[in-house]
Each structure stands twice: as C-alpha cells, then as structure tokens.
Image (cartoon, rainbow, N blue to C red):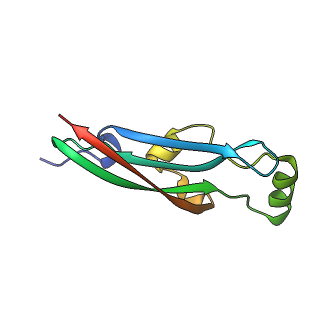
Amino acid sequence: FPLPHPRYFPAGPQIVLSVYGPDFFGHDVVRGYGAVHVPFVPGRHKRTIAMFVPQSTSRLQQLTSWFTGRRPEFTDPKVVAQGEGREVTRVRSQGFVTISFNVM
C-alpha cells in the first residue's frame, strides 16, 4: 500500500533555535534561526545546526532597518521548523551552533 504524503508523515520532534543579541545601538536583534530533528536512537549524539537570518528585499529597506534597529524576523517559529514557504524568503547564513543530545 502507498505511503502517506510527506506533509502528513511527521519526521519527529525538532528543536527550533532563535538566537538574539545586542546590535551596535544596544537593541536586541535576531542573530540567527535554525532547527534540528531530535534523534530517536539511544546514545550520545552531536548535531551541528546551520543558522540563518532573514534579509530585507531592497537596499532602502536594509538602510531603514539599520537606522531604526528593527530588522526582519520571523513571527512564527513554525516557519523555521517546517521550511514550507521559506524558499521565497531571502536569508543569509549566520554561522553554526553545535548541540549534544543524550538519548535514553
């Protein structure tokens, strides 16, 4: 029998990271987003998460957000976890975060 569509077949629990930090003016701004699936196999697991930040679509928006201290950010963490609709979002790579899991 056929398998269900991937949209209806959950891939398991995920950890979604939203990292914030101060900018040049002391405003709390997003430093990166990332997500990783939690492993099911018992043992110690290390995962490296590629972090990214959303980008403004025009130079004027970039300049305005720099002056106002309000940079683009996601309002719903599901955008990071699902990835659906993210292919039309402009993002910039922002480093990596490594986490360790101890699964029992």
Image point (63%, 61%), residue name = 90
Left or right: 10, with 23 as reference point? left
Image point (57%, 37%), residue name = 76
Q: Farthest left residue? A: 1
Q: How many marks?
A: 0
Left or right: 37, with 79 as reference point? left
Q: For the C terminus, which image quadrant? A: top left
The spot of residue 1 in percent (x, y) is: 11, 47
Confirm whether residue 11 shows in the render: no
The spot of residue 64 in percent (x, y) is: 86, 54
Q: Farthest top residue? A: 104
Image point (32%, 46%), residue name = 100
Confirm whether residue 18 shows in the render: yes
Judging depth in this view, the residue of 63 and 9 nearest the camera is 63
Left or right: 42, with 74 as reference point? left
The spot of residue 14 in percent (x, y) is: 37, 40
Image point (53%, 61%), residue name = 95
Judging depth in this view, the residue of 43 and 4 nearest the camera is 43
Judging depth in this view, the residue of 104 and 82 nearest the camera is 104
The spot of residue 15 in percent (x, y) is: 40, 40
Judging depth in this view, the residue of 41 and 77 nearest the camera is 41
Left or right: 22, with 16 as reference point? right
Vertical arrangement, residue 9 with respect to residue 48, above or below? above
